[in-house]
Each structure stands twice: as C-alpha cells, then as structure tokens.
Image (cartoon, rainbow, N blue to C red):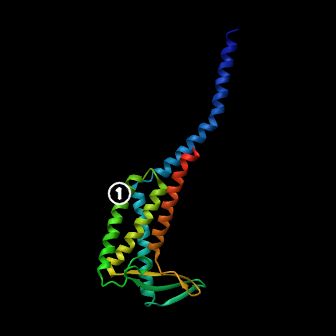
C-alpha cells in the first residue's frame, strides 16, 4: 500500500503534464499543417496562376481592341478612362519611335526573362509561397505582352489614369501583373530580411 501512493502521484503528475502540453502541441500541429498546405503548392499550381493572368490579359485586350477605335476614350471616373492605344516600345513608350527592331528585342528580352523566372519558380515552388506568387504574376504579365509583340507588333493598352493635365501612360492587365508581382517581390525580401532580427 505505501508504494501505491508515489506511483499514483507520479502517474497523475505525468497525466497533468500531458494535459498541460496538449493544447500547445495541438497549436503547433495546426500551424505545421497550415504551413504545409501553403507550401505544398507545386510548380504546376503557380504555372496555372501565370496562365490565368495571360488568359484574362489577352481576353481584355481582344475585347477593347474590337470594342473601341484607336485613341477613343470612354470616361469612367474623373481620373480614369478606358481607351485604346498601341505601344511599340516598352514601359512609358520607351524606344517606341524606333523603326521596328525594338519589337524583336523586347520579345527576346521577355522570353529570356520568362525562362529565368521559370527556373527560379521551379526552385521556390512548394517552399516560398509569397515569392512564388510574385514570380507567377511577373511571368504571366511578361508573357502576356510577349504574345502581343509576336502577334501584332505592338502591345495593346487600354487603362488610362490622369489628373487634370497630367497623364500616366496607358497600360494593360499584364502590366498590372508585373507591377504587383514586383511589389510583392520587394515585400517578400523585406520580410525575409526582418526574420533574423525578430528571432
């Protein structure tokens, strides 16, 4: 009988300790599952994200190319119009006035960038979801504009923002994807730089 008391106390202590650790272990398991689900998206998923951007970009370009005449503007907001313009250069009409070599130069540049992004995306897919999303958005946007250059010799733009006499150069959804992807890329780098300090 005397020996039973310590054993029962030890057993009870172990049980209470197990109950104390239970919720924490449960939280860790939930966090691990969430991270696994987020990181478990493979290369195929992010390529589908890029493809979705390309499809939406091309569909909107075809629509406005048929619905509007060149340089036509439809006012939507005091600071925003829908329009139709063709850009034979790069962003901000860079090299747009060149005789035509810029078409193939920017096409090749876009394809090289797409290959490099694809290689990096293959390495990050499944491990860094935020970075993978940024790369997928840039990839989709870059290829969306490459398709324009190959098919038409120019990029179709239809979104125009302005304020009084100031106008931001017209752009398209591929440009939106590239810009948002670049911002997310910078954000991801800043957050990764802060991790060691927080730890």
- Along the viewing direction, whichever of 55 and 146 lies nearer the viewer: 146
- Along the viewing direction, whichever of 41 and 127 lies nearer the viewer: 127
Identified at 66% across, 32% down, the residue is 20
Q: Is residue 195 left or right of residue 55?
A: right
Identified at 57% across, 84% down, the residue is 76
**Placement of 92 over or under 5, stated as above or below:** below
Q: Which residue is mark 1?
A: 119
Q: How many marks?
A: 1
Q: Position of residue 140 (x, y in %)?
A: 41, 67
Graded by Cα atoms within 10 Å as few (under 14), some (14 to 19) or many (20 or more), the crowding at tag 1 reads few
**Placement of 57 over or under 118, stated as above or below:** below
The C terminus sits in image quarter: top right
Q: Position of residue 102 (x, y in %)?
A: 32, 78
- The quarter of the picture where residue 141 lies is bottom left
- Along the viewing direction, whichever of 117 and 52 lies nearer the viewer: 117
Q: Is residue 18 left or right of residue 106?
A: right
The secondary element bearing badge 1 is classed as helix
Q: Position of residue 38 (x, y in %)?
A: 50, 52
- Along the viewing direction, whichever of 154 and 100 lies nearer the viewer: 100
Q: Position of residue 112 (x, y in %)?
A: 32, 66
The N terminus sits in image quarter: top right
Identified at 44% across, 57% down, the residue is 132
């Amino acid at each position: 009988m005397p020996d039973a008391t310590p054993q029962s106390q030890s057993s009870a202590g172990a049980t209470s300790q197990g109950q104390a650790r239970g919720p924490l272990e449960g939280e860790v398991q939930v966090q691990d599952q969430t991270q696994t689900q987020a990181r478990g998206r493979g290369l195929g998923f992010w390529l589908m994200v890029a493809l979705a951007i390309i499809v939406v970009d091309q569909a909107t370009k075809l629509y406005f190319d048929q619905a509007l005449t060149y340089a036509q503007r439809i006012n939507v907001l005091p600071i925003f119009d829908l329009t139709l313009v063709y850009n034979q250069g790069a962003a901000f009409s860079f090299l747009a006035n060149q005789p035509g070599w810029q078409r193939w130069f920017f096409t090749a540049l876009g394809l090289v960038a797409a290959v490099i992004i694809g290689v990096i995306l293959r390495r990050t897919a499944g491990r860094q979801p935020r970075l993978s999303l940024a790369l997928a958005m840039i990839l989709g946007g870059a290829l969306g504009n490459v398709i324009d250059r190959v098919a038409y010799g120019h990029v179709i733009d239809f979104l125009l923002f302005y304020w009084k006499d100031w106008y931001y150069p017209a752009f398209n959804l591929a440009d939106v994807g590239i810009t948002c992807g670049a911002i997310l890329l910078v954000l991801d780098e800043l957050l990764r730089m802060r991790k060691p300090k927080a730890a």
